Image (cartoon, rainbow, N blue to C red):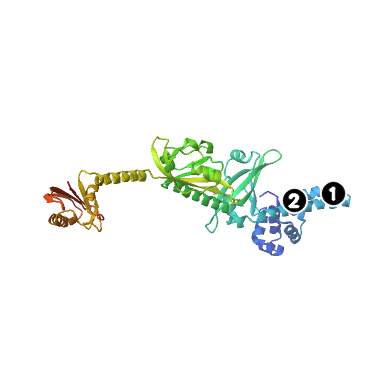
Amino acid sequence: MKKNGFGERLKVLLKQKSLTQAQVANAVDTSVPSVNRWTKGGEIEYENLRSLADFLEVNWVWLRYGDEAIESLQSAEPENGAMKDLRREYLNQILENETRMKAALEMAQIINWEWNVLTGTVTCSENATDLFGVAVDHLPNCVMPFTKLPIEQLIDIFGSGQPYNWDFEVTDDQGQTRWFSSRAELVYDAAKRPVKVIGISDDITARKEAETALAKNEYILKKIIDIIPLGLWMADETGKISLANPEVQRIWGGAKYVGLEQYGEYKGWWEKNGQELGAGDWTLARAVKNGETSSPEVVNIKAFDGEQRTIIMYATPLRDNDNKIIGAIEVNQDITDLKNTERDLKTSLAQWQAVFDQDEFAVIQLDNNLQIKKVSEKLKKSLKPKAKKWQLTDLLDPAIAENILQQLAKTQRKKFISFSIDGSSITGTDKNVPIYVIHDERQDRNPMTLVFFLM
């Protein structure tokens, strides 16, 4: 607190008049903490200043500004009463401006403070304890973590001529954490010596909480994008690719962050007709240019690592509140293994069908109930038109057919067996040929039996 300042004069008066702070607070109609703050040089409103001066029976200008202010007024006071009134008006305006500034800061929930470089004393606005949520004697610690710095460092930080900004957190008396932002600068005296740091602080807890929540959401979203088993592209409103997640990098053997006109660097051919895609055929391009939300489309691609892959791609535009396109996202799903399995299955089915289409030997397939499910074309030609399901006895001698069925009935489940019957006769012919039976019951759902013989 400044020696012979407002606070010092007030304390001397209270001591001289044997007044307690409570008595003063009651007389001026204010709180004891406010009177305590005044004794430390804190701000005081004009109305409270006049009431306080009246109660203490002193000149309010002297109380607030000291002997020098009184001497200046007296020495400069002219005989002209109009000039005296003008000076009084200027003083009133100064005090009123101080009051308005204080009210504006309080309404904006901004704390203003001063830290005396030489004495280390702190003066804060009346709203400091409420906004910081801590006792007055804790304010210097939470507001100014720089108070123990050497004067040289203090000048480096605050003496650049531009306000210095920093954020800090305060744990209030209820254990809650609040965040504040401060701006301050160093004030020099006429001899260019550092005198005090003046600054303001405002509560940014809501902003910090929003930033923390946003950072958390961004972190979660990034993790999801990184680990999902789908390739995810993102482009801005011009079509320039801005994001390609790790699965995209794997599918395509890399990624090129190009604009719409360079989409042709990605090579692909439609699965449905084999035609090559142009730069504007990719779903990402159509989403940006035309606002199209596409259905899944199958494309065979040649990745940058030289691998041939098959993908499903689809995209959707991104729009702002005015329905304006601000970008687009595309999803790629790698179905290469599925397509290869599908192709292998088609090949296997074609090869399986070839067994029944050939003319070298007869083949019979039995279902899990040992009923005829399928016969080869060679055998089908020798049979009468099918009026009902063929029975094994329609093709083989009943005794031979029964022999086969009995042997199959003895087979344990989940087994693969094969056997042959020599000297078998085929129904409707004179041929005695060996018959070969293969039974596979390793698959629980669909046991399969094949009977082969020459005709």
Instruction: Judge left or right: residue 360 versus residue 23.
Output: left
Question: Splitting the image into 4 quarters, where does residue 311 fall?
Answer: top left
Q: Which residue is mark 1?
A: 77
Residue 66: mark: 2
Is there any visible trace of residue 343 in the rendered image? yes
Q: Secondary structure at mark 2?
A: loop
- The residue located at (54%, 48%) in the rendering is 318
Residue 41 percent across, percent down from the top left: 67, 52
Q: Amino acid at mark 2?
A: Gly
Residue at the image point whose x is 54% and y is 41% from the top = 239
Q: Name the amino acid type tagged 1.
A: Glu
The x, y position of residue 279, in whole percent, is 50, 38
Question: Between 47 and 5, which is closer to the camera in this rendering?
Answer: 47
At 47% from the left edge and 47% from the top edge, which residue is drawn? 314
Q: Say whether residue 343 is left or right of residue 29.
A: left
Q: Position of residue 58 (x, y in %)?
A: 76, 57
> Mark 1 to mark 2: distance in Å?
17 Å
In depth, the one of 7 and 15 nearer the eye is 7
